[in-house]
Structures are given as structure tokens and as C-alpha cells.
Image (tube, rainbow, N blue to C red):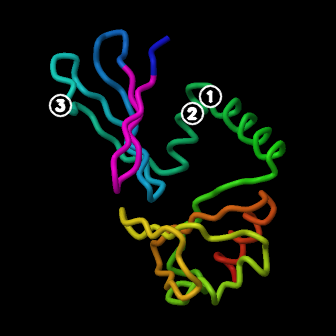
Amino acid sequence: MPELEETPLPGVGLRVEFKAADGSRIGVVHRRTGRRELFVCSASDPDVVTFSLEMSDDDTHALADALGGSSVVESLTDVTQRIEGLAIDWLGIGGRSPYAGKTIGDTRLRTRTGASVVALLRGDQPYPAPGPESRIEAGDTLVVVGTPEGINRARAILTDG
């Protein structure tokens, strides 16, 4: 079984790749924004990308299902969260969010859900430990920590108000 190599990409995210049986390199760039990019590099030059595809969350889950891995990953994630009682999620702010253009404090997420915003991602720029005065814009991603139930309530609040 090939070994996965992880390479931190400061300010961008994480690159995870492996060497395939034919010598090519296959991998994924996990961006801090939550986007993923699947890529393949040629066997003759591992620095030349021969194929690249940006994938949405739905695309990623569909590919994992097709490869037979998502149910195992979801089960492991669920067990880990139940054991530790702590979850983390990346919640995107859509243009229709009632909190786009408002502050984190305006959401009252911590009071209403018990979940805490630990980072705000705008494009590829992370803002760790944002204060209640930090503005939320459409397209931002909030990194939220709490119980799985609290995070689900936070998602609903950020979507519906």
C-alpha cells in the first residue's frame, strides 16, 4: 500500500499525495477555505501537473463513495466525535445568510449554541481567533468548534437566522 505524504502549504492548506503503481503522483490539495483540488503528476517529472480538477464537497463525497471509502471515514469521524464529545466544522457563509455583512458578535453563536468560532477564512487568508467585532462577509468560512449538535444549530443559524 502506498504511503501518503503530507506537505503543509503555509497560508494555503495541506497537500496530500502518494506514488501510484505506474510511478505517477496522485494527490489532493486541501485548501483552508474547504476547497479541494485533485491532481496527477507525471512519472517522468513529479513537479509537472498533468491533470487537475477542483472538487466541491459533493464531488469529493461522490468520488469517495465510488472508491468505497466514505462510509468508513464517516463512521470513524462519528466514533471520534462521540468519544471526545468535540467536533470541528467549516461553515460557509452564503450570500443569503442573514449574517453576511454583520459581526460574529451579532450571531450570538456561543450563547445560542455553545459552539465557538475559532477562525475566519476569507479566500486563502486565515484569521485565527477572531473577536466578536470581526465582520462576516458572503463567501467567508467560519471554523467552529463545539458539540456536533451545537455545530448543527450554528449552521442553521448562519443559514436561516
Which corner quadrant of the image does residue 48 belong to? top left
Depth check, front residue: 105 or 65: 105
Circles 1 and 2, Cβ within 8 Å, touching? The answer is: yes
Q: Residue at x 41, y 43 (%)?
A: 14
Tag 1: amino acid? Gly
**Where is residue 109 drawn, in percent x and y?**
71, 78
CA separation in Å, label 3 and label 1: 28 Å
Q: Which residues are magenta?
A: 4-18
Label 1: which residue? 69
Residue at 22% over, 31% down: 50
Q: Main secondary structure of the magenta part?
A: strand
Vertical placement of residue 121 versus 96, above or below: above
Q: CA distance from mark 1 to mark 2?
A: 5 Å
As drawn, 62 above or below 134: above
Q: What's the mark number on residue 64?
A: 2
Q: Amino acid at mark 3?
A: Val
Name the residue beneath numbered marker 3.
48
Secondary-structure class at tag 3: loop
Q: Amino acid at mark 2?
A: Ala
Query: Which residue appears at 78% of the width and 73% of the height?
Result: 113
Q: Local crowd at mark 2 within 10 Å, few (<14), some, or many (≥20)?
A: some
Which label lies toward us, 3 or 1? 3
Residue 12 spot, x, y in % from top left:
35, 53
Neighbor class of circle 3 (other Cα within 10 Å; few <14, some 14-19, many 20+) is: few
On whether residue 39 falls in the magenta region, the answer is no
Q: Is residue 110 toward the left or the right of residue 135 in the image?
A: right
